[in-house]
Each structure stands twice: as C-alpha cells, then as structure tokens.
Image (cartoon, rainbow, N blue to C red):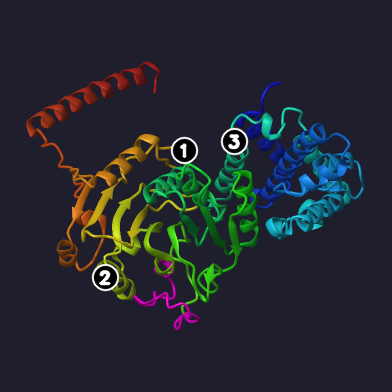
C-alpha cells in the first residue's frame, strides 16, 4: 500500500482551507484547520496502536486497556475523527466536535490541558448561523476524510512529515496574516540558521522565552541528533501557545514544557524562586516592543536588569537581559533583533556597553531586508556565550546575499552554509566578515553598527568621459533622423 507523502498531506490540508476562504481571515480559520489535522493524527495514531494490541492480545480487553494507558495519548471512541465524521449530518455538529475536543483534553490533562481552549467549532460569530456552520464543518471533515490521508505511523513516508506539514501550513498562514503572522512564526531559513549557530548538544536544556509556534525550538532540538534534550518555552498569546503544543506533539516531542504567559512580567520557568537555567536559549522576540512593562519591572524580583532598565518604548534589551539571566555558566544564546539595538544610545547604549564589557557578546550577523513576515526592515542575529575566553566580537555582513522572491526574500542553503562556515572559522573575509577587538569597539563608543566594522563600499569604475561624449553625440544624431522620419510619415498622412 502506498505511503502517505509530505506533498499529499500538504495538498489535502491546504485544500481544506478553501472551505473557509471568503468566510473569515486565515488568522482565524488556521485554528480550525490545524486542530482538525491534529485530531486526525491522534485518531490514526491511536487506531494503529489498538489494532496492534488486538493482534497481540486477542480478546483480552484488560491487557489491551492496560497497555493503552501507557501510550502517550488516551483516546476514547467518542472523540476519534471517525466518530466525529459519522456525525457530519448532525444539526449540532459544532457541539459534537467541541465535546470531543473537551474529552481529549480531560483524558490527557497532563499533556494536552488547554490545547483547544481558543477554538470553538460552535461559534456563531466566526462560523455563522447553524445551517451555514454545519455546512462548513461538514466540508472540513470530508476534506480530512480523504482516503489518501492515512496518518498511521506505519503509513507515513518519514518521521517528520506530519510536523513538517504543520509547519508548511503555519508558514502559509503567517504569510497571509502579514504583520500579525510575524508574531507567531519565524521563517524557516532564519530558524534553521539560528539553530545551527547555537549548536544544541546531547543532554541540553533548550529554551525560547517568546516561542511563537515553536519553530525555533523544534529546529534547535533537531541539531542534537537524538531524543536526549529538554524543551522549554513560554508564549504570551494563548492561541499561539496552543499551536506550539500541537506542533511539538506532531514533531514527536511529547514532553515539551510550553507555558502560557507574559515572559517579562511573569516568567514561568523558575526553580526555587529563581529563573531556571538553560544550556541553549533561542528567540525571535517582538521587535522594539512598546509598553513592555518597564514601570512594573523597575525593581525586578528576578534581578534580570543588572545592566540597566531599557526604555519604556523599546523592549529589545529587556528580552536580551532576561535571556542572559536564563543562561547557565556555559550557555549559548542566539536572538534575532532589529538593527537599532546595535547603535541606539541613552539607556540602550549603556546596557550594550555593559554586555560587551562583561564579555558576553560573541558575534553580530547582519541579515538581508524583507526576510520576515510583516516587516521589510533588515534584522540581525546576535550570538552570546557565557564562557568566552577571547575578548573580540565577530561581525558578518550577510545583508546582500539572498534569493529575491515576489513578496519576501529568502536565504538559500548556500547562503546559510557560507554564514555558518565563516562564523565557525572566525576568519576575516573582505567586505563580508571582520574580527573586531575590544579596543576597536571601545574606540567606536560601543556602537556595533555593522558598516563600522565591515566595509562593503564598492568603488565605481571610472567613467570614460570621451567615450561617453561620443555616445551622446551618436544618440543625438540618431534622434534627429528619427524626428525627420516621423515628420515624413505625418506629411504622408496629411497631418
């Protein structure tokens, strides 16, 4: 029997979106499509487990049920995709689905509590009145009932196809959502690059304080090469936190600890009333967040702002200092930030100075413009390390090397490979990379603006004045002849 491919899952799931187009914006209907994909996965996964146990234990229902309780999910018959599909003609289809989701959460409280809290399949506001709502949901179920969409583990072409399909959909929804999409998704190339730069290893605890849909955490964990790692994240938006938890399960990361809350005002990964410490921290926090909580955190309980309190209107260095405070003594950290953090003065300048003087900043990597959803501004990746022995800072200007697309630029594997090779070799490359000494940075008043360290100026070729004059004279002569020809045509036409 033919296995289910990545392309098949992508196409069927994306086609399911057609059910909602014109009814609501993708930022709303994404929750319905992604939730149904998750339920279909749970059902197919569980069905295969039940079939295998029935083959093994025959009619011994007690042994079967005992074994099922040890599986990563428990799924009652009343909340499987097949059960919901059987009720597709119900006049209360939305309520049938809601009850199934509620039961899934109840039976898997430790792992799935709150995962469906923000999606209501019986919402009149979003899905319309009863007749219209039932029609939409019926079509959605029929889309996912496609016989080609067999999500049993034994029928999948590779271990990551479900999770990658989820990422595929999230990327499309983020693109449609524009600026709002940028709040929950980091482009795949950027998250891959950042993950490779911080090099998570076996046994590492990996943390993202603004984890969005979880793509950075997932990419970072893939660098480990096995399952010996621990994932921690926090996300302020409840809908997005639910997406993150689903995304983790679909990537076979079943014990990720993803919390819901404002990381700056209320960090939730704590131990003994202190911030939990991590080996690797990655993040793409909201750029220059306004009203991030400066007034409330002037006397921070966790002492995160030892280098100074950032301005009220720009939270970039609030996130940076939270992340630094969350690193263990040998920790590595990679964060995507706007270029302003490199050169803005006042309190941010003082914080930047302290970070450099404490020898925490390892590298500054300039990225191309228009890589991120919702903003065309170029960003930078900053790499920090707690156990540095050298005092220099490595600068890479990768802003001019990218693939230009219609709506958004991208980094190719070749572009990423060049950045990684250059960073790991820490070598000078003319007009691309420079190792700046601490003295050099001090001479620049701790301004880290990349052009101060990597000169990308290209001298223009000298202009041949005589050849240019001759070319102008030739063009003027041709223009005279064209005007004469045009006049003859007009005369022939009697005009």
Label 2 crowding class (10 Å Cα cut-off): few <14, some 14-19, many 20+?
some
Looking at the picture, does residue 479 appear above or below residue 430? above
Q: Who comes first in sequence, dot 2 or dot 3?
A: 3
Q: What residue does disc 3 label?
A: 159
- Say left or right for 320 vs 18: left
Q: Secondary structure at mark 2?
A: helix
* Separation of residues labelled 2 and 3 (CA atoms): 46 Å
- In this view of the protein, which residue sits in the foreground, 392 or 152? 152
Identify the magenta region. 295-319
Q: According to the image, label 2 marks what residue?
A: 353
Residue name at image x 25 percent, y 52 percent: 395
Side (left or right) of 416 relative to 449:
right
In x, y percent, where is residue 168?
Answer: 58, 40
Identify the mark nearer the N-term, 1 or 3.
Answer: 3
Inter-mark Cα distance, 1 to 3: 32 Å
Quarter where residue 427 is shown: top left
Q: Which residue is mark 1?
A: 406
């Amino acid at each position: 029997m033919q296995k289910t491919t990545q392309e098949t899952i992508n196409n069927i799931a994306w086609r399911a979106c057609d059910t909602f187009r014109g009814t609501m914006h993708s930022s709303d209907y994404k929750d319905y499509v992604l939730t149904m994909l998750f339920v279909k996965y749970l059902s197919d996964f569980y069905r295969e487990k039940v079939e295998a146990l029935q083959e093994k234990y025959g009619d011994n229902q007690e042994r079967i049920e005992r074994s099922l309780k040890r599986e990563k999910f428990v799924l009652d018959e009343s909340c499987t995709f097949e059960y919901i599909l059987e009720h597709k003609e119900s006049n209360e289809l939305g309520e049938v689905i809601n009850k199934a989701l509620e039961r899934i959460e109840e039976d898997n409280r430790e792992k799935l509590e709150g995962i469906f809290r923000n999606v209501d399949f019986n919402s009149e506001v979003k899905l319309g009145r009863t007749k219209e709502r039932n029609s939409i949901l019926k079509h959605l179920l029929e889309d996912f009932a496609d016989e080609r969409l067999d999500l049993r583990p034994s029928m999948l072409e590779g271990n990551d196809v479900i999770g990658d399909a989820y990422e595929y959909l999230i990327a499309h929804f983020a693109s449609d959502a524009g600026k709002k999409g940028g709040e929950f998704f980091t482009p795949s190339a950027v998250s891959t690059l950042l993950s490779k730069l911080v090099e998570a290893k076996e046994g590492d605890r990996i943390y993202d304080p603004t984890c969005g849909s979880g793509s950075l955490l997932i990419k970072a964990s893939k660098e480990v090469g096995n399952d010996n790692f621990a994932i921690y994240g926090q996300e302020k938006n409840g809908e997005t936190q639910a997406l993150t938890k689903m995304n983790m399960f679909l990537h076979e990361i079943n014990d990720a600890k993803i919390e819901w809350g404002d990381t700056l005002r209320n960090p939730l990964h704590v131990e003994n009333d202190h911030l939990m410490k991590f080996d690797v921290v990655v993040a793409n926090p909201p750029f220059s967040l306004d009203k991030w909580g400066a007034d409330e955190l002037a006397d921070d309980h966790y002492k995160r702002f030892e280098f100074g309190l950032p301005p009220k209107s720009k939270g970039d260095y609030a996130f940076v200092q939270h992340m630094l405070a969350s690193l263990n003594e040998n920790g590595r950290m990679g964060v995507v930030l706007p270029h302003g953090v490199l050169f803005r003065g006042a309190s941010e300048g003082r914080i930047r100075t302290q970070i450099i003087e404490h020898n925490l900043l390892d590298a500054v990597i300039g990225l191309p413009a228009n890589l991120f959803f919702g903003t065309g501004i170029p960003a930078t990746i900053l790499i920090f390390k707690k156990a540095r022995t050298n005092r220099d800072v490595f600068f890479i200007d990768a802003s001019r090397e990218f693939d230009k697309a219609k709506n958004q630029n991208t980094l190719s594997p070749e572009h990423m490979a060049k950045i990684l090779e250059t960073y790991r070799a820490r070598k000078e490359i003319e007009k691309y990379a420079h190792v700046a000494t601490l003295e050099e940075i001090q001479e620049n008043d701790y301004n880290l603006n990349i052009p101060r360290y990597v000169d990308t100026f290209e001298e223009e070729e000298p202009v041949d004045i005589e050849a240019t004059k001759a070319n102008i004279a030739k063009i003027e002569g041709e223009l005279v002849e064209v005007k004469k020809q045009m006049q003859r045509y007009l005369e022939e036409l009697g005009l």
